[in-house]
Image (cartoon, helix red, strand yellow):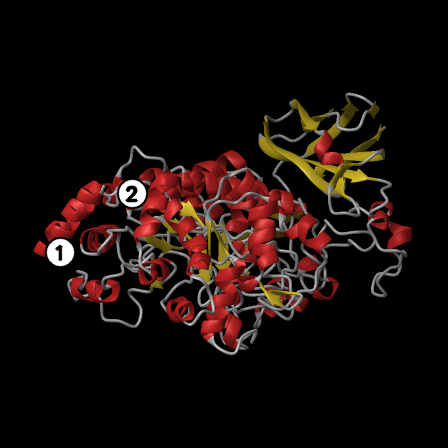
């Protein structure tokens, strides 16, 4: 061994480039036949303090620096300057605004500099966003997360995730800061669109499919925001929350635990908020005790952008960024994204004794392990031709349309106004001729607007008239006359209303109330007053309250941001070419003042009613049972152009032992004249438990295709685990006593039966 090191010393003296090539052939960390842990051990012991700290840092190339020439080529000298001798662990979003060809060239060059021109040749992780498609110019844009969950189709989510992973990997991106596993517990929050809805179990299922699909393609996921970032009072983002550990474990931690244990996620992103005054970025209980101790997570954690800085500048838990860096690193936060700001100060902190080098070895080990697991040391480059071929490939665009079709939700259809069978159709509204994609969407998307989709669907069938009518938020009535004139000429008016990411919703755009903004509601009422049929299409990223106008219109369609093919899918639904099948994964309240009101919540200690609704208990026995849960449209709601009847609910047993399974089956009959898909939902209630339980808990669902006039027998298996609860020690315990099973078309409309666990 001494001879080897003498040889290495001699080689280093003759020149850095030649020596580095030989070093990599000899050092064990470059040997793929060794175990990953052996390779990590070997590499870690060879790294300087600076090299270790830089693995915990990131560069934000492409923002604030002139790194692109006018030809689109990367300025390699700048990369060399930024990397220096130490290399870098992560590069943040260097190609967001580049088409696939330039993306590959850029990232391959970044990797080449890291691998061939730094001392140890450690490849980088290149990150970007991919909530509903990679955020690269010209990439495929699928329906936003809330729309994907509205399909209630996990096999479709798997297809979409695989496609996103393929297109992402083809561009050279190795890490996506997705999916969002926060819950839509309060729809005033601006980023509801990024979630999979309000239910933790449903969000877990969709999150697992996303992560497994993307990571199968060689791209690691960093789900966010760990944890409970969207549920501060009033639906405000990033505020301090004072939720009990029980609430966190039963609700907010559920999707993340599934991501770790079921999907094998390689990374997690910490949240901006604090829990009982302790910022998540510096929360040892969260990042180490729960994530690694309880769940066995072996990947690495990353900050939300500038989150380490924010623990100093906003939360003020430390008097300097250096002190914040020390606190976060020791708590279990491994990587500081997106720039070299706080964590580079760890070099001086180690020298001054504020943190030990052995402490950061723990962080760096986790980062290196994932890089080895990805195979980056053996193959850091991608083929340019693959990226060009997969950029918004035809099969991806077809998949985007399939997902958009299944995501659209029919909320109201009086007088069978839909599907439209009229000769003249007026299309009016601020979102009628606008492509609304939602947050974290790719640039340069070749999508279609609702107006374009409607024209395509009704070509040769109906005449389409158009007027904008009004803006989204402006108090401007000047377009009303044109809109009313168009509506008077038509047989029916489709009003395409709603919101826009960055204007009425999205990041930093929380709402005071959920009414349509500007003069949109007044336009709806003016057009409705003409006495002709009216259909309102809501294109938005969150629920909308409708009490001021819903009784005046015949139809309401909810189209959460549906991606590049959303316009075509909408046209097909309105024309009856597609039978709508989407269902809500978030409750729509009657009034904002009811919020928050998710289905999965504990009962109150005394029954009461809203002063605005004094006669609920007397007039409606169904609503009486859920008096506090009195939505406009409940969780799981969605209509079809046909009707479904539930009957003959049967349980395999009426009495079971603790831990045993029970089989639930029900007949679902398509009583209408057209074929349709029904989303059959299974809910469970522990009727009596010493820890009070939710009135209903979603425990299963199936999307079932049923031809007109036919019946399908739908079967579920309720495992013993689904009858469990967290006891006084927050440990899982199987409940006993009486349980109620409810199977229906939504959480309030179905059939039920009871069984006993002994």
648 to 407, vertically: above or below? above
* Residue for point 12% across, 50% down: 11
Q: Residues within 10 Å of mark 1 (few under 14, many from 20)?
A: few
Nearer to me, 719 or 734: 734
* First in sequence: mark 1 vs mark 2: 1
Nearer to me, 327 or 263: 327
Residue 485 position within the rendered picture, expressed as x and y whole percent measured from the top left: 51, 66
SS state under label 1: helix
Mark sitting on residue 507: none
Quadrant of res 272 = bottom right
Outermost residue, front direction? 2
Quadrant of res 248 = bottom right
Nearer to me, 73 or 139: 73
Residue 59 position within the rendered picture, expressed as x and y whole percent measured from the top left: 32, 63
Q: In this view, does 693 lie to the left or right of 150?
A: right
Nearer to me, 177 or 235: 177
Q: How crowded is mark 2: few (under 14 residues within 10 Å), some or many (20 or more)?
A: many
Mark sitting on residue 29: 2
Quadrant of res 593 = bottom right
Residue 301 position within the rendered picture, expressed as x and y whole percent measured from the top left: 47, 54
Cα separation between marks 1 and 2: 19 Å
Outermost residue, left direction? 14
117 to 346, vertically: above or below? above
Can residue 515 be seen here? yes
* Residue for point 81% across, 39% down: 686
* Residue for point 56% across, 76% down: 316
SS state under label 2: helix
User: What residue is shown with label 1?
Assistant: 16
Residue 432 position within the rendered picture, expressed as x and y whole percent measured from the top left: 47, 59
């Amino acid at each position: 061994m001494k001879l080897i090191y003498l040889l290495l010393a001699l080689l280093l003296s003759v020149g850095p480039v030649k020596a580095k090539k030989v070093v990599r052939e000899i050092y064990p960390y470059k040997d793929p036949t060794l175990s990953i842990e052996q390779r990590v051990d070997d590499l870690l012991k060879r790294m300087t303090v600076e090299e270790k700290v830089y693995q915990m840092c990131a560069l934000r190339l492409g923002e604030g620096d002139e790194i692109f020439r006018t030809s689109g080529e990367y300025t390699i000298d700048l990369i060399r300057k930024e990397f220096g001798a130490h290399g870098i662990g992560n590069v943040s979003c260097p190609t967001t605004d580049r088409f696939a060809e330039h993306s590959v060239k850029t990232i391959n060059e970044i990797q080449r500099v890291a691998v061939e021109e730094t001392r140890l040749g450690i490849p980088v992780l290149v990150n970007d966003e991919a909530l509903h498609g990679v955020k690269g110019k010209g990439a495929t844009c699928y329906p936003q997360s809330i729309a994907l969950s509205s399909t209630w189709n996990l096999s479709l989510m798997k297809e979409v995730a695989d496609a996103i992973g393929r297109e992402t990997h083809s561009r050279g991106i190795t890490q996506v800061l997705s999916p969002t596993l926060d819950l839509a517990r309060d729809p005033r929050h601006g980023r509801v669109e990024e979630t999979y809805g309000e239910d933790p179990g449903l969000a877990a299922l969709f999150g697992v499919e996303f992560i497994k699909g993307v990571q199968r393609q060689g791209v690691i996921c960093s789900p966010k925001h760990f944890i409970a970032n969207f549920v501060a009072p009033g639906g405000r983002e990033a505020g301090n929350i004072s939720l009990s550990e029980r609430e966190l474990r039963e609700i907010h931690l559920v999707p993340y635990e599934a991501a770790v244990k079921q999907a094998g996620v390689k990374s997690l992103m910490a949240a901006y908020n604090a829990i009982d005054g302790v910022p998540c970025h510096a929360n040892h209980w969260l990042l180490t005790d729960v994530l690694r101790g309880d769940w066995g997570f072996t990947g690495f954690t990353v900050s939300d952008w500038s989150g380490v800085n924010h623990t100093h500048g906003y939360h003020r838990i430390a008097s300097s960024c250096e002190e914040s860096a020390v606190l976060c690193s020791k708590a279990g936060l491994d990587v500081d994204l997106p720039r070299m700001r706080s964590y580079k100060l760890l070099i001086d902190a180690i020298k001054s004794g504020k943190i030990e080098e052995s402490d950061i070895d723990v962080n760096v080990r986790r980062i290196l392990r994932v890089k080895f697991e990805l195979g980056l040391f053996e193959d850091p480059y991608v083929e340019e031709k693959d990226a060009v071929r997969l950029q918004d490939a035809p099969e991806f665009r077809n998949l985007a349309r399939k997902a958009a079709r299944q995501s659209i939700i029919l909320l109201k259809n009086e007088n069978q106004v839909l599907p439209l069978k009229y000769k003249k159709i007026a299309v009016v509204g601020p979102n009628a001729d606008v492509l609304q994609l939602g947050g974290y969407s790719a640039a340069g998307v070749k999508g279609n607007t609702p107006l374009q989709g409607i024209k395509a669907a009704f070509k040769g069938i109906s005449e389409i008239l158009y007027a904008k009518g009004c803006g989204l938020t402006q108090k401007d009535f000047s377009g009303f006359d044109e809109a009313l004139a168009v509506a008077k000429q038509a047989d029916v008016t489709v009003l395409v209303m709603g919101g826009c990411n960055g204007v009425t919703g999205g990041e930093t755009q929380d709402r005071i109330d959920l009414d349509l903004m500007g003069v949109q509601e007044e336009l709806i009422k003016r057009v409705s007053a003409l006495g002709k049929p009216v259909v309102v299409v809501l294109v938005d990223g969150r629920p909308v309250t409708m009490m001021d106008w819903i009784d005046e219109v015949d139809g309401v369609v909810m189209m959460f941001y549906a991606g590049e093919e959303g316009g075509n899918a909408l046209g097909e639904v309105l024309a009856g070419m597609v039978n709508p099948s989407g269902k809500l994964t978030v409750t729509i309240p009657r009034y904002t003042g009811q919020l928050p009101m998710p289905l999965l919540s504990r009962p109150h200690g005394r029954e009461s009613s809203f002063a605005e609704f004094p006669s609920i208990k007397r007039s409606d026995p169904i609503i009486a049972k859920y008096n506090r849960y009195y939505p406009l449209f409940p969780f799981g709601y969605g209509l079809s152009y046909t009707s479904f009847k539930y009957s003959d609910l049967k349980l395999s047993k009426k009495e079971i032992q603790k831990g045993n399974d029970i089989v639930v089956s029900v007949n679902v009959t398509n009583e209408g004249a057209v074929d349709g898909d029904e989303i059959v939902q299974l809910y469970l209630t522990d009727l009596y438990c010493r820890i009070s339980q939710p009135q209903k808990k979603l425990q299963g669902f199936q999307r079932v295709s049923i031809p007109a006039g036919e019946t399908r027998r739908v079967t579920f298996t309720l495992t013993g685990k689904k009858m469990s609860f967290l006891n006084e020690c927050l440990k899982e315990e199987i409940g006993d006593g009486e349980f109620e099973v409810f199977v229906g078309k939504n959480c309030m409309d179905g059939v039920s039966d009871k069984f006993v666990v002994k």
